[in-house]
Amino acid sequence: MERRTIGATALEVGAIGLGCMPMHWGYTASQQSGEGALRTVHAALDAGTSLLDTADMYGPFTNELLVGRVLRERRSEAFVSTKCGLLVGEQHVVANGRPGYVKRACDASLRRLQTDVIDVYQLHRPDPEVPVEETWGAMADLVSAGKVRSLGWCAIGARAQRRSRAGMYDATIRQLERVQQVFPVSCVQAELSVWSREALTALMPWCASRGVGLLAAMPLGNGFLSGTLTPGQGFEPADLRARHPRFTAEMMAANQPIVAGLRRVAHRHDATAAQVALAWVLTQGRHVVPVPGTKKERWAVENAAAARLRLTPQDLAEIAALPRAMGSWE
């Protein structure tokens, strides 16, 4: 698989990563690691994927334990990214950016991941009660201690901080400017896909101009852009899409022209709509690495193969002309 470089530390990863979250969080009520999920991670590595993206809150903890089982055998083939800063309660998730907590969380993640160093340690969400420079300083100390190789910022929660899409990353960029004064940001993880392009306006140029990698989260639109979801099919209560405005039967039907357009492009390449969606993300910059999430071996292998797909100018023009997605994200 093609390799891409993340950040000033010049850490190389496969062009397409693996988001491990769906194996234990967001899409399933199961808290068991499962041999199927284990095979999925191994299959991704076999296909050339190296970036494994997880977090301590997924499960919580079970996702890191699963990745740790793989790292125990194949650490040299993997690039591990995990996150700290969110605590899962019975009813809600809260941020914790206190320096002492951050350092304890890192030690716990290292144990679960069965490794002596984390390649990228991301701040999952800043704590409004703690100056972000203090949290980032504690994370920088982990780099000095040899426990972490580089630091990343997770901006997925930025959408929840604003009611409109316009300028949704303005606050994030201001925070990134602040922490850059403390220690370099190697990568930012943010949502980017054919039906969610807000990151292209300000966040992407900010990253490109500073040599910061962008990890494109949800590049398949929570599965919608794969074309495998049927309007009105319904989702399990634990599935985040069950409460998502874009996944009502009405909005899924309204957005089918987007999938149809991806399928038309895919037909010319003997590919799938999902592979075209991932290939489009790859064209957005050499510093961009899409991180599609899946718990199934089949999709992990198919996603990895998208790194070989080369879209033509005609393909890109057709994708650019697709209708904008309908339905609020709020």
Image: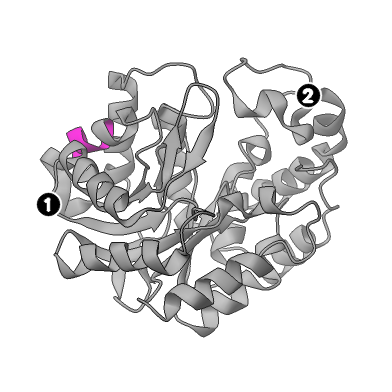
Single out the residue that lies furthest toward the front: 129
Which residue carries the number 1 mark? 116
Residue appearing at x 81%, y 55% in the figure: 164
Left/right of residue 315 with respect to residue 132 in the rendered view: right
Where does residue 327 sit, x and y in percent of width and height? 84, 40
Q: Are marks 1 and 2 in contact (CB under 8 Å)?
A: no
Crowd around label 2: few <14 · some 14–19 · many ≥20 (10 Å): some
Q: Is residue 50 visible?
A: no
For the stretch drawn in magenta, what is the main secondary structure?
Answer: helix
Left or right side of 167 for 95: left
Q: Is residue 212 left or right of residue 247?
A: left
Q: Nearer the viewer, residue 274 or 243?
A: 243
Q: At which x and y percent is residue 211?
A: 44, 80
Q: Which residue is mark 2?
A: 231
- Residue 3 figure quarter: bottom left
* Residue range of the region highlighted in magenta in the rendering: 66-70
